[in-house]
Image (cartoon, rainbow, N blue to C red):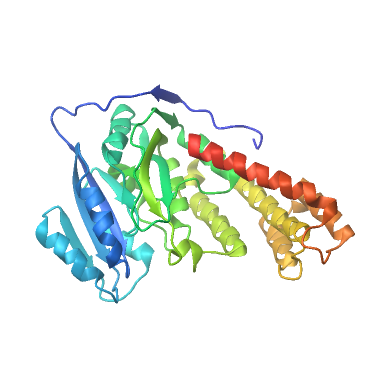
Amino acid sequence: MSGKRLVPISTVTAPVPGVRDGRLATVSVIIPCYNYGHFLPDSVPSVLSQHGVEVEVVIVDDRSTDDSAEVAQRYADADPRVRLVRHEVNQGHVAAFNSGLAVATGEFIVRLDADDLLTPGSLVRAVALFDAHPSVGLVYGHPHHFTTDRPPAAQTEMRGWTVWSGRDWIAERCRRGINCITTPEAIVRGSVVERIGPLSPRLEFAQDMEYWLRVAAVSDVGRIDGADQALHRDHAASMSVTTGSGLMLDLRERRTVFDVLFDGPGGDLPDAAELHDLSRRTLAAEALQDASHAYDRGHTGEVDVDAFVDFALETFPQARTLPQWRALQRRRMVGARVAPLMPTFAASVVWRRAQREVRERRWVRAGI
């Protein structure tokens, strides 16, 4: 299974959004917010300005200590499409989203972090795919990442869309072991949300990854190709670079993602055990690669290599049979050097860099 590649069940070039008998689709956009009030003047209008759909904005203030609640209330007072849910105590981003989900009424659901934006036409593009493929429960596209104060212009012309079977999409994620969706570029069919429930409290940082996989366990997956479906703001205060960062933390969280998935709807897939095993093999191999990378960079004095080895064996007991294990043993035989880069394995560093670039280009183009 590990050598297989994801094959779409449908591709469409330059689709044209259809008309729903004069009825507009309703989309609920849930915006969890904690001390991000200064970002709301970007995120909220990006939703309210969407054309071709009826939007409902649910802002959940998670007991912010800044003026987030006041900013959100001003939007709610000015536009009946906006409502504010206020937490009396801080409960975290998972509970905040789930609170918004509990009151959302839309046919489709979007989670939009307060520091991110939707792009013009993103919702109507996604709804067109949903309407054309009733089996699809999740639609996503390319998120344009930016670091500037002002959001950049987005590419809004799509070249087509791609649809995969949910099971095959899950298999691809098990084979790669990583998330391919940032979050704001994804939209889920409401009937599927009713079936699978809210975000899992078992996860601290990677709950979105598990949610997309859970959706795929009960429905097919579609992607808008070509257009930017969201603008994702990268900044120093975001969780991905603060409490949610760290290689070992990330590995453990992703392992839990697959455990939660296969404890839930993923466990009903015909080859669930094989897929779960594949995900664990993938993560073990990644941990061993991280350990090798520490040797290649001369960072063994700073990196707990044994922790990565222990993780690999704990995750996949047959880790000693993996080629990554043999590669690590070769490095251990040579030993760590004081030099910043071990000459013996310098080519590996170059190769890994080239592989990352290839994966990045593939992700931008195909979303996988």
Quadrant, the N terminus: top right
Task: Give residue 35's quadrant in the image.
Answer: bottom left
Q: Residue at x 81, y 63 (%)?
A: 339
* In the displayed structure image, the side of residue 314 where residue 252 appears, left or right: left
Q: Up-down: is 148 above or below 181?
A: below
Q: Up-down: is 271 above or below 8?
A: below
**Which residue is most to the right?**
333
Q: Position of residue 11 (x, y in %)?
A: 43, 24
Q: Up-down: is 92 above or below 6?
A: below
Tell me if residue 54 can be seen. Answer: yes
Count of labels in the image: 0
Q: Residue at x 26, y 28 (%)?
A: 17
* In the displayed structure image, the side of residue 49 where residue 257 appears, left or right: right
- Front-lying residue, 269 or 161: 161
Tell me if residue 101 can be seen. Answer: no
Q: Position of residue 335 (x, y in %)?
A: 86, 62
* In the displayed structure image, the side of residue 200 where residue 72 appears, left or right: left
Task: Give residue 296's quadrant in the image.
Answer: bottom right
Q: Position of residue 6 (x, y in %)?
A: 55, 32
Q: Residue at x 43, y 29 (%)?
A: 162
Q: Position of residue 9 (x, y in %)?
A: 46, 26
- Front-lying residue, 203 or 112: 112
